[in-house]
Image: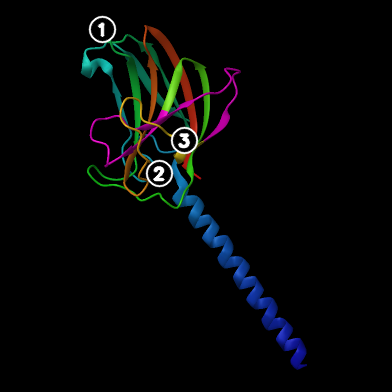
Amino acid sequence: MKTNSNNQKMMLMAGLVALSSSVFSLSADATAMIDDFTAPANTHFGQPRQYLNDSMAGGATQDTHSVKNGILQVTGTITPPRGQPGWSSTVLPLAALGQAKDVSEFEGIKLRVRISQGNINLSANSLDITNFDFHASPVVVKTDGKFHEVKIPFKEMKRAWSAQTPLNTTNLTSLSIVAYSLQPAAFDYEIDAVSFY
């Protein structure tokens, strides 16, 4: 009888451990999500998405943004300012303006993306960087009409024109998905989800 009671206690403890592990896993998954585009205007952190382009720097880039059925679509035409690359940026804030998020528990950024045309990169924007040369990486997938999962390790993200420094993942303010070109060019991409991994 006592053995049966001990067995029941062991089974109960094993069940509680399994339950707590699954709850922890769900919590970690929720924290890892940056934006699944189910909300019309805000990221998973409750911050409004921002859309910027080179018109603020003398360019004439035109872009449109739509969120429908959990997918962000960004289309447009890049018309660069003279002597500079043209760009259109979708900014996903991780915290309120002037604040940062510590994401050092993660290895990098994961996104599901479909690129129909154009070039895009992803930057991780840290409070440490003051000259806008944020750590970035190109996002390269086949233009086959399908969504592709892309993983970008933090350690592979580089700065374009400044001295190479490690990305400080303890104070990220936002991520930017940027369509870019040195010459006039059309772009069209869709993002299904962005998360840390």
Q: Which residue is mark 1?
A: 82
Q: Quadrant of residue 8?
A: bottom right
Q: Residues within 10 Å of mark 2 (few under 14, many from 20)?
A: many
Residue 181, magenta (yes or no): no
Give the residue type that dot 2 points to: His
Q: Earlier in the sequence, mark 1 or mark 3?
A: 1
Residue 150, magenta (yes or no): yes
Q: Which mark is residue 33?
A: none
Q: Which residue is mark 2?
A: 44
Badge 2 marks a residue whose secondary structure is loop
From this view, report whether residue 6 is shown above or below residue 24.
Answer: below
Badge 1 marks a residue whose secondary structure is loop
From this view, report whether residue 58 is shown above or below residue 125.
Answer: above
Q: Quadrant of residue 166?
A: top left
Give the residue type that dot 3 points to: Glu
Q: Position of residue 130 (x, y in %)?
A: 23, 35
Residue at the (44%, 51%) spot, across then down: 31
Give the residue type that dot 1 points to: Arg
From this view, report whether residue 2 is shown above or below residue 111.
Answer: below
> Could you tell me how far apart the alpha carbons at marks 3 and 2 are, in whole angstroms?
25 Å
Near-viewer residue (147 or 170): 170
Find the magenta span and give its range.
122-151
Near-viewer residue (68 or 85): 85
Residue at the (30%, 45%) spot, across then down: 95
Furthest residue to the bottom?
Answer: 2
Q: Residues within 10 Å of mark 3 (few under 14, many from 20)?
A: few
Residue at the (40%, 44%) spot, across then down: 44
Q: Which residue is mark 3?
A: 156
Q: Position of residue 27 (x, y in %)?
A: 49, 57
